[in-house]
Image (cartoon, helix red, strand yellow):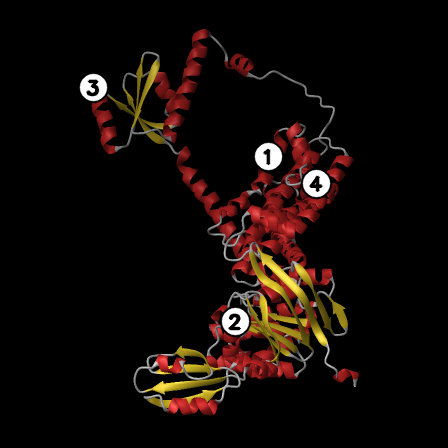
């Protein structure tokens, strides 16, 4: 029974970090439970990478406390063998054979060289690069180099995997492949903390989200609860045959915001609990509408709303 | 995974990255080819220096002079009236030598100065000396006695037991300088290269900057030491060949491989190489782009080694050499050199070595600290003051 109770494998309490006069991380706290896919979301420069570097002791926090509880050990700093890390700044040895680099990177994380070789070959097979194992990294395409970088972070079978912007620089096809890899690793028991700014991709895999902006917490909780809390608003997108009549739209009942997409399209956001039947009755009287689409706000929209309200 | 296991993993990686036996062999072959080209080319270029060449002399010149020169030169006599015409010809054709005399002095005409002119001047000097000896009635033996040096019997209280100690000290100093310069290039490439390839963050998330730095220092020092060993073996083989050609038995090389000296020089050499590698690693850690960094000039610092070695041999007991033999950046070559050529007590040798080892210990810590803080400064190369400020914070 006890085993079924989720336990925090990472507890972050009130960490802060200043760089000269800039507050990069401002008093943030969060917990990551075993088996989570925990998404750290925010725009560029929000403080995501700084937080991840603090977690890995690459830089020190000015204040706050971090507690890791991995593989039955509680530490302020995790053992390298338990952690996998894909840094935002990608880089590997370009002039060295791929297999040799992968074995080295796994071995400095404590993996036996024989096991590392076996695991590397398996992963290279999985990403269709097995036949290029002895080639130098520099001959691979950028996308394939990204895949090798990803393999380097998970080869030693970490308990906890940190992925900093795993989707950046990938084409849509490779983004989907990476999403499948992340799901697969998570299903095998690895807890994942990922930072990203591509919210539609994160929505596909994350169980919990932490929204951060200007180093401060905007939201911390499960993905389902963020929709329950902030996703009750109604969004309607209208297509017009001629120019949008903005004035009429701004006077609709319950309207919160009017966003002009282009000359013929507009997005209307209505306050929670707005009577949509009444709204539709009003819209019937607006001339020139050729199409109406209604949907609930996605993570991206919730995030923008939270920034606006902050 | 303990500290040493990780350091050994990084050391092995760095060593295998940079020590390429094939490249080393190619380097040696190129070196041998270049040396041979210089040796045989030089010999060929100088081979005609003893050749007999033609000198034109004005007819009225002393017949005794012509007699003394005829074995070494082809002499061609020219009438006095043709002197001006002949000088014009030399100018036009840029060739030919004309010797004339005017009273006691000689006149030499040539298009430009050359080795031939120097040879003729030596012949004229000899002739002049003989003529003067005859004039004052001096015999050749009497002249030799006048020119011979004073006889001095030298008695030193400290005698250098074996000149082999000096030869070996020089050999070790040269090999050490070689190892430092070889490591130097690799250390630079290894650290700045990894920074430019953005590998550092991946590495320091797995191992501490200290382990990373220690592995680099040991691995690249080992690369330098491997080159040092290769060239040691080559030197010994070269020495054996030298003994063979000079008729000395090959076993004479044993005299030079004096064990007590080796036992003293080797630890100094190893500690010196490690210390210099730690310095180079610290400097390389601050440099982001070696092509555009003013700090790259600091990398010529190991030249100190070479200068120190030369200064010691000039005066091994001066205050300056005493300082150099204790100062950790120069002691690795200076103290063994002093030990080889003058009297140095054992406590001095031990003390100097201890300071060298302690310097290495602290320099590697400093190098790791500089590396740790310099990777936090992104987008530009950190200044010394920024590194200092950040190192106080971390």
Disc 2: which residue: A307
Chain of the residue on which disc 4 is drawn: B
Quadrant of the rendering where the N terminus of chain B is positioned: bottom right
Residue A110 figure quarter: bottom right
Q: Nearer the viewer, residue B114 or B282?
A: B282
Q: Position of residue A243 (x, y in %)?
A: 31, 82
- Say which residue label 4 marks: B255
Residue A97 placed where, x, y %?
55, 69
- Looking at the rendered structure, whether the residues under marks 3 and 1 are on a common chain is answered as yes
Q: Tell me: residue A112, above or below residue B60.
A: below
Q: Residue at label 1?
A: B310
Same-chain status of marks 4 and 1 = yes
SS label for mark 4: helix
Q: Chain of mark 1?
A: B
Label 3 lies in what chain? Answer: B
Q: Evaluate whether residue A151 shows in this view.
A: yes
Residue B62, above or below B73: above
Q: What residue is shown with label 3?
A: B81
Chain letter of the residue beneath label 2 in the structure image: A
Q: Nearer the viewer, mark 1 or mark 2?
A: 2
Identify whether A287 is placed above or below A10.
below
Spatial distance from mark 3 to mark 4, Cα to Cα? 68 Å
Question: Which quadrant of the figure contains the C terminus of chain B?
Answer: bottom right
Q: CA distance from mark 3 to mark 2?
A: 110 Å
């Amino acid at each position: 029974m006890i085993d079924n109770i989720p336990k925090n494998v990472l507890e972050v309490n009130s960490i802060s970090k200043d760089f000269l006069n800039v507050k990069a991380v401002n008093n943030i706290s969060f917990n990551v439970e075993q088996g989570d896919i925990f998404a750290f979301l925010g725009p560029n420069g929000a403080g995501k990478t700084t937080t991840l570097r603090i977690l890995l002791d690459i830089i020190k926090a000015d204040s706050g406390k971090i507690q890791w509880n991995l593989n039955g050990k509680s530490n302020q700093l995790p053992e390298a063998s338990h952690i996998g890390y894909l840094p935002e700044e990608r880089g590997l040895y370009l002039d060295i054979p791929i297999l040799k680099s992968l074995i080295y990177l796994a071995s400095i994380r404590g993996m036996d060289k024989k096991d590392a070789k076996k695991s590397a070959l398996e992963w290279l097979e999985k990403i269709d690069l097995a036949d290029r194992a002895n080639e130098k990294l520099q001959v691979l395409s950028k996308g394939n180099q990204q895949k090798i970088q990803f393999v380097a972070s998970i080869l030693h079978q970490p308990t906890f995997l940190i992925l900093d912007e795993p989707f950046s620089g990938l084409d849509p096809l490779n983004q989907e492949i990476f999403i499948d890899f992340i799901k697969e690793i998570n299903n095998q028991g690895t807890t994942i903390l990922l930072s990203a700014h591509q919210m539609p991709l994160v929505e596909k895999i994350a169980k919990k989200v932490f929204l951060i902006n200007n180093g401060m917490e905007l939201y911390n909780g499960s993905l389902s609860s963020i929709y329950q809390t902030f996703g009750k608003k109604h969004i309607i997108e209208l297509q017009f045959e001629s120019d949008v009549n903005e004035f009429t739209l701004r006077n609709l009942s319950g309207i919160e915001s009017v966003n002009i997409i282009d000359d013929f399209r507009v997005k209307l956001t209505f306050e929670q609990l707005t009577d949509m039947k009444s709204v539709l009755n009003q819209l019937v009287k607006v001339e020139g509408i050729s199409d109406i689409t209604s949907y609930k706000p996605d993570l991206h929209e919730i995030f923008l709303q939270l920034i606006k309200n902050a | 995974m303990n500290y040493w296991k990780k350091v050994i993993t990084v050391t092995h990686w760095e060593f295998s990255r940079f020590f390429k036996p094939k490249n080393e062999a190619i380097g040696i072959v190129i070196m041998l080819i270049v040396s041979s080209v210089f040796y045989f080319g030089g010999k060929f270029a100088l081979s005609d220096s003893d050749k007999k060449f033609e000198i034109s002399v004005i007819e009225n010149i002393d017949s005794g002079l012509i007699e003394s020169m005829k074995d070494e030169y082809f002499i061609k006599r020219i009438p006095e009236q043709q002197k001006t015409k002949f000088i014009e010809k030399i100018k036009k054709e840029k060739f030919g030598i004309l010797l004339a005399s005017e009273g006691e002095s000689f006149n030499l005409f040539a298009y430009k100065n050359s080795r031939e002119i120097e040879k003729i001047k030596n012949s004229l000097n000899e002739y002049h000396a003989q003529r003067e000896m005859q004039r004052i009635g001096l015999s050749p033996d009497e002249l030799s006695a006048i020119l011979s040096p004073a006889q001095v019997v030298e008695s030193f209280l400290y005698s250098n037991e074996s000149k082999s100690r000096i030869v070996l000290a020089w050999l070790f100093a040269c090999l050490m300088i070689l190892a430092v310069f070889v490591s130097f290039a690799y250390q630079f490439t290894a650290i700045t290269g990894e920074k430019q390839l953005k590998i550092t963050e991946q590495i320091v998330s797995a191992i501490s900057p200290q382990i990373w730095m220690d592995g680099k220092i040991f691995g690249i020092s080992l690369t330098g030491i491997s080159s040092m060993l290769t060239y040691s073996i080559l030197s010994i083989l070269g020495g054996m060949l030298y003994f063979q050609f000079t008729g000395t038995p090959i076993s004479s090389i044993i005299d030079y491989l004096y064990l007590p000296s080796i036992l003293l020089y080797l630890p100094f050499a190893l500690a010196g190489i490690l210390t210099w590698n730690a310095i180079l690693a610290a400097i390389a850690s601050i440099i982001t782009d070696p092509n555009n960094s003013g700090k790259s000039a600091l990398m010529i610092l190991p030249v100190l080694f070479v200068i120190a070695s030369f200064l010691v041999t000039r005066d091994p007991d001066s205050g300056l050499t005493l300082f150099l033999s204790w100062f950790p950046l120069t002691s690795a070559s200076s103290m063994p050199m002093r030990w080889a050529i003058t009297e140095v007590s054992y406590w001095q040798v031990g003390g100097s070595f201890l300071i060298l080892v302690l310097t290495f210990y602290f320099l590697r810590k400093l190098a790791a600290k500089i590396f740790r803080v310099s990777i936090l400064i992104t987008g530009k190369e950190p200044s010394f003051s920024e590194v200092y400020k950040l190192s106080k914070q971390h």
